[in-house]
Amino acid sequence: MTALPTRRDEAWRYADLEAVARAWPLPAPELISVTSGESFTRTILQDTGRIQQIDLHLAAHAKAALHVLNIGGDYGRIELNVTLDEGADFTLGAAQIGGATQTLEVITTVTHMGPDATSRQIVRSVLAAQATGTYLGKVAVARGAQHTDSEQSVKAILLDRTATANAKPELEIYADDVKCAHGCAIGELDAMAMFYLQSRGLTPAEAKTLLLQAFISEVFEGAADQDKLQALALARLEALT
Amino acid sequence: MLSIHNLQANVADKPILKGLSLTINAGEIHAIMGPNGAGKSTLGYTLAGRPGYDVTGGDVTFDGQDLLALDPHERAAAGLFLGFQYPVEIPGISNLQFLRESLNAQRKIRGEDPLSGADFLKIARAQADAMGMDMDMLKRPVNVGFSGGEKKRNEMVQMGILNPKLALLDETDSGLDIDALRVVGEGINRIMRKADKAVLLITHYQRLLDYVQPDFVHVLAEGKIVRSGGPELALELEREGYRELAA
């Protein structure tokens, strides 16, 4: 893309376009190729405010697991364009935690090019004040990519009525023997769970933090630096509540 | 220990408790029985401070403090424990983490030092053992995938670890088979039958009272206590039904 995007561009519809304009033109996306049968892992910590674009190609039976913590700056956008050859396996665990007027986005396109590939995306957003958190995720299944197994699990918790969550899992399927699951839920903290925790002695802030920590915990499962990510997420949650 | 005077409370603007008075002294076990909709669970929730349970009149003193002025977590730290009729499932938090943080939060409010992980585990293990609960279950997320009986057993493990002065047990006997009922009953006696503690059992049935002998039995109907007596009252209720007695 060479022209500055507008709201009419679906992938940029909820973006902070002023921040995008300041960063424009964007450098070329980072290219990562995982060769046949190899494994790749990466943790992406977005804590300063930036647009990060990655093109990730998984050759046959290659594996990749990305873990994302999107928390910093006025505008943080992680954009992943993933292609999977036969039998490849892609996992994304992403957490976005935003307050004030932050805009945080995870945008993915996962294309199953060959058969028998699996992809699993888990995205959890916690949003307070006037923050906006967006997940736009397209799973495309090419003709002939039979036995694709893909899953998108997208959930957001709004801590204030003024916060916004956008979630759009999207499927484009050109094969007839595939499994593509997607689920999406946006809600508030469970009042009964809050009361249960407080009735055991936790302050409202402690109860909130504990529930939110639990809400995002599965995102970091399997990450090499799981403990560090949990600690960073916890610190951000504590700052919000 | 607990003195409730003319308590009135609304839920969603509907009056449920309509002038309830009750005094519980240290060393006593009280049972509140009553038909569905009498306000039994509302009493438990109101005393524990659940949001949405609005006190519209009366007062409650707990250990010399104005209970109703305290937030739910402060009531817990003051020594009040509510055993839930439907314990809440919380995915992603282990029982052990939840209970350790809860206990230390209470200790902090009381001005006590936090317990170390090792000291806490010692207490947790002893309480789990006493309730016949596997330590592995304490490592699992709070109540997730637990059967009804396991959830109630877990409430008793929590009560043992938190060691309250006053336990309000809301239908702790519901959903229990005979064996689990005995274990839970023994747990209540072991943890709470002490000179400096007290219990308020909220129940529909006599059967829990076979294991936990109450000193006083009260009948709650339409938001008020309509009769009080000794343990024989529970037997009479079982025989005659609520309708006769409340009339």
Image (cartoon, rainbow, N blue to C red):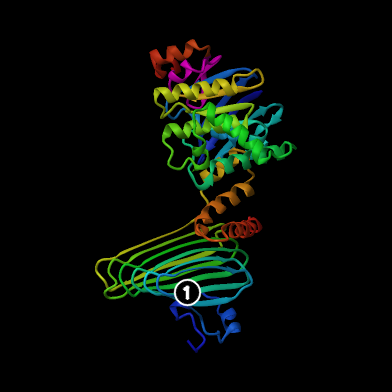
Q: Can residue B47 be found in the magenta stretch?
A: no
Q: Nearer the viewer, residue B176 or A87?
A: A87
* Res B220 seen here: no
Residue B227 in the image: state x and y as whole percent.
51, 16
Q: Which residue lies at the image location 66% right of the left edge and 23% below the top edge?
A: B1
Q: Nearer the viewer, residue B245 or B96?
A: B96
Q: Can residue B224 be found in the magenta stretch?
A: yes
Q: Which residue lies at the image location 63% right of the left edge and 35% below the top edge?
A: B76
Number of marks present in the image shown? 1
Q: Residue furthest front?
A: A37
To which residue does mark 1 refer?
A80
Which quadrant holds residue B4?
Answer: top right
Q: What range is drawn magenta here?
A: B204-228
Judged from the image, the secondary structure of the residue bearing numbered disc 1 is strand
Label 1 CA crowd tier, 10 Å (few <14, some 14–19, many 20+): many
Residue B52 in the image: state x and y as whole percent.
54, 42
Image position of A76 with respect to B187: above or below = below
Residue B207 in the image: state x and y as whole percent.
43, 19
Residue A206 in the image: state x and y as whole percent.
63, 48
Tell me the kind of residue under disc 1. Leu
- The quadrant of the rendering that contains the C terminus of chain B is top left
* Res A22 seen here: yes
Q: Which residue lies at the image location 50% right of the left edge and 41% below the top edge?
A: B12
Image position of B137 with respect to B239: above or below = below
